[in-house]
Amino acid sequence: MTPILELKGITKRFPGVLANDHIDLSLNKGEILALLGENGAGKSTLMNILYGLYQPDEGEILVNGEKVTINSPTDAINQGIGMVHQHFMLIPVFTVTENVMLGNEAVKQAGLLDRKKAADRILEISNHYNLEVNPDDYSRDLPVGVQQRVEIIKLLYREADILIFDEPTAVLTPQEADELFKIMRSLVKQGKSIIFITHKLREVMDIADRVMVIRSGAMVGETTPAQADKQSLAAMMVGRSVDLEVDRTESKPGELVCSVENLTVADKFQNIVVDDVSLEVYSGEIVGIAGGQGNGQTELVYAITGLQ
Ligand SMILES: Nc1ncnc2c1ncn2[C@@H]1O[C@H](COP(=O)(O)OP(=O)(O)O)[C@@H](O)[C@H]1O
Ligand SMILES: [Mg+2]
């Protein structure tokens, strides 16, 4: 079977950096291909080339066996290629419908926007792929997990068949990530094909059908979760064997060095972003603060360090 997508010999140089070094990659219809690599390995560069944001110095791209030229995201979309970026690109003061329509407006006679038609189509997509959203919600009010769903709907609205997710779980809680994985499964079941970019081994083992590993700009290996384990994936990713166990002895905390009592912080819109938080840190210990991005961690740190 012809792969739905093939990259052949893709090379991209930035001043002083060979970001992609003759990369070959193929994606089959209906599969989730994980592209695994450390920070700086060249994953985003490769996907930005595929999405028309960068031009390769060498190499070619084939869609359904035919060579294509992708000079812009519009070209990519016309080839059925869509990308969910690492950082979302929704307009906060627009509704879900307006965000999805943006750049692809349904228009009534006399040039008026047909919001109703767009909203209906969004609900159709949302039901079909189990992507729950309310078309009338403003995107600034949505949790990141839902914003990401809107980004996915935006691609499906443009009839993308090849979906690229660039580190989609970086901004999600583990629960939201599991939710996203269900969505990805449902997408491939219905014939979509996915390139999933990550540097997290657990995610590769959980969701990928096949794994390609990129290191310092070069494709260094290909495997499947059935053939690999976290240890072997980590070794491929960094190029030497790695110890995944942190050697941790029990901590023996000393005196109290930082005490936060009933701290409340408002953001610039006067929303309470840190709400009555208390914590203590003793010398010689590591205190972890867990939470999805955007839940007040930044403001907590700013307040403790006097920046806010
Ligand atoms: N626009 C750019 N200009 C110069 N160097 C870049 C640019 N984009 C990426 N790079 C460099 O290319 C290499 C690969 O980066 P990137 O593709 O972002 O890696 P990854 O997504 O795997 O973390 C890095 O060394 C990075 O610093
Ligand atoms: Mg990246």
Image (cartoon, helix red, strand yellow):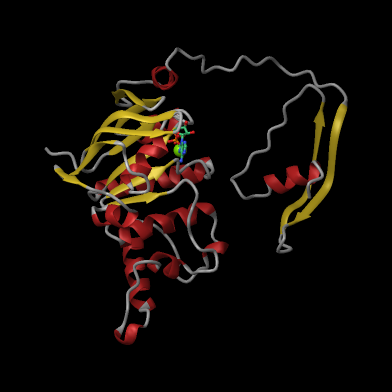
Q: Position of residue 3 (x, y in %)?
A: 17, 39
Residue closest to the far right: 255
Figure quadrant of residue 60 = top left
Left/right placement of residue 278 relative to residue 232 reads right
Report the front residue among 173 and 213.
213
Residue located at (13% from left, 39% from top) = 2
Residue located at (38% from left, 55% from top) = 152
Q: Position of residue 54 (x, y in %)?
A: 36, 44
Q: Position of residue 55 (x, y in %)?
A: 33, 43
Residue closest to the far bottom: 110
Residue located at (32% from left, 78% from top) = 107
Residue closest to the far top: 241
Figure quadrant of residue 199 = top left
Figure quadrant of residue 266 = bottom right
Q: Is residue 82 above or below residue 95?
A: above
Quarter of the image where ligand 2 sits: top left
Q: How many numbered discs?
A: 0
Residue located at (35% from left, 38% from top) = 46
Q: Is residue 111 above or below residue 138?
A: below
Report the front residue among 1 and 132.
1
Q: Position of residue 52 (x, y in %)?
A: 33, 49
